[in-house]
Amino acid sequence: MDKDLEEKGRKIRAQLWDAKTLEEIDQSLRQFDEPFANLLNEQLFGAIWTRPGIPLKTRSMITMAALMSLGRWPQLKAHMLGALNLGITPAEVKEVIIHLSQYSGVPTAVEAIRIFNEVTAPKR
């Protein structure tokens, strides 16, 4: 376990998700397989998301675009929430969906819109 990558990964993830969501994700992944949970935190978030050259908000938009194109709906929802937590505006998320609709198709855009409406709905 690389402590530096572990810390970097946790720092990035804390910017994306609130403490409760992050704890739920961690618990689920660790329950499945602790080495795999460590791999995701250290390599994906600690090594990849912290690389220089692309700002964090841009990485977040790229991630949403990839997840939308691949139809990975639960992960898209999580990363939409993360994008909003990073300060990406709902209008910017909307533009990602509209832009990608021409590349990944209308059905993927319709599902992304459903998720967008869910994550941007006023809290009751």
Image (tube, rainbow, N blue to C red):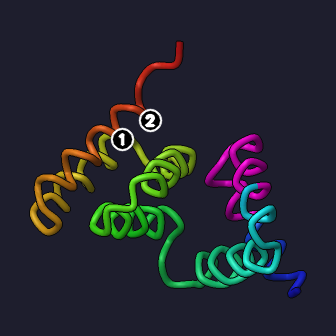
Q: Quadrant of residue 29?
A: bottom right
Residue wearing tag 1: 115
Residue 102 relative to residue 79: left or right = left
Q: Quadrant of residue 44?
A: bottom right
Q: Quadrant of the N terminus?
A: bottom right
Q: Residues within 10 Å of mark 2 (few under 14, many from 20)?
A: some
What residue do we see at 86% from left, 87% from top? Answer: 2
What residue do we see at 73% from left, 71% from top? Answer: 9
Residue 59 image point, x, y percent: 47, 70
Q: Answer above or below: position of 67 versus 96.
A: below
Q: Amino acid at mark 2?
A: Val
What residue do we see at 15% from left, 58% from top? Answer: 101
Q: Which mark is residue 51?
A: none
Residue 80 image point, x, y percent: 45, 49
Q: Which mark is residue 119?
A: 2
Q: CA distance from mark 2 to mark 1?
A: 6 Å
Marks 2,1: beta carbons within 8 A: yes
* Magenta span: 11-27
Residue 16 among magenta residues = yes
